[in-house]
Amino acid sequence: MAQQTAIGKALWHQFTVVVILRENMRQRTQSTEDAKLRTALENMRYKSCTDEDITFLRSRIAGLTQGKPKLADPRFRHISVITARNMHRDKINMLGAKQFAMDTNQILTDFYSLDKWKNPTQSRQRKKTKYAKQVHPSEIIEPEIQKILWNLLHTDTGHSAGKLSLCKGMPILIKKKIATECCITNGAKARVVTWHSHDIDGVNILDTLFVELVNPPKEIQLEDLPPNVVPISREALEIECRLPNDTLEKIVRQQI
């Protein structure tokens, strides 16, 4: 731990200049209330909120009294929600996907990840953490274990989903920077347009997801695609999974 602290301090002292970005790259247009919110958030950073900031923030608290925002308002039906814990976010996403499918008279399509074992290295086996002791004879995961891996909570898989439930028109949030020049960045809002997939042993595997960016900073036009529609392809990630028996396993997961 002391060594990690020393390395952390050494890395921190490598920084000579720190900047604060003033221009919001995800939203160029703004209302008067948008400007007030950004001012309040900036003042929070310096612990210097004014009475005007506090009054504005209190005016945005949902309630039943007149003038308060109402959560039952149709415009809040399928909006993004910031939660304190990731497990709450995952549950809201699951319920929200079902609700959106019901509201639009669609059926959710489940897409599963492609997984294979990542055998632990000798250095990792020496750690005291409870890793699986056996070295798997091949990369192929047994069907029973695969079902368990698909159904693990996202918090037990490094937030790499084993199963994605989608339907057309569903609002989504892009959670990684894929192509800045195409506005496919972390936090960008989009809607599902369509997808390319294939079947393996009776389960759907997602190859490419096509989404329409919502209010991007600039219009994106890719060849043979409608305006602001961009593809997101499957990629392989090495992740650590915590199984129900508290054993940790390394796998390579391919998912959108």
Image: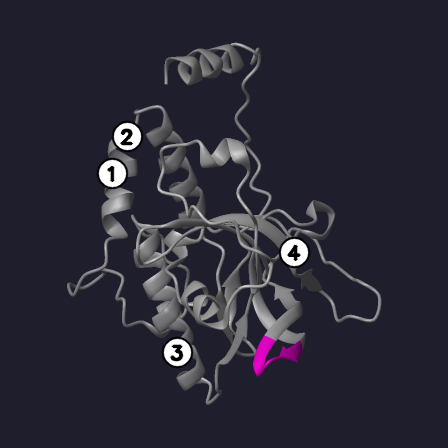
Three-letter amino acid code at disc 4? Glu
Residue at 30% x, 37% y: name it. 53
Of tags 1 and 4, the one toward the viewer is: 4
The residue indicated by pointer 1 is 54
Residue 15 occupies which quadrant of the picture? Answer: top right
Q: Earlier in the sequence, mark 2 or mark 3?
A: 2
Q: Residues within 10 Å of mark 3 (few under 14, many from 20)?
A: some
- Residue 179's spot in the image, x, y percent? 70, 49
Discs 4, 3 touching: Cβ within 8 Å:
no
Residue at 40% x, 44% y: name it. 131
Discs 1, 2 touching: Cβ within 8 Å:
yes
The residue indicated by pointer 4 is 235
Residue 47 on the magenta span: no
The residue indicated by pointer 2 is 50
Residue 91 occupies which quadrant of the picture? Answer: bottom left
The residue indicated by pointer 3 is 98
Dominant SS in magenta: strand
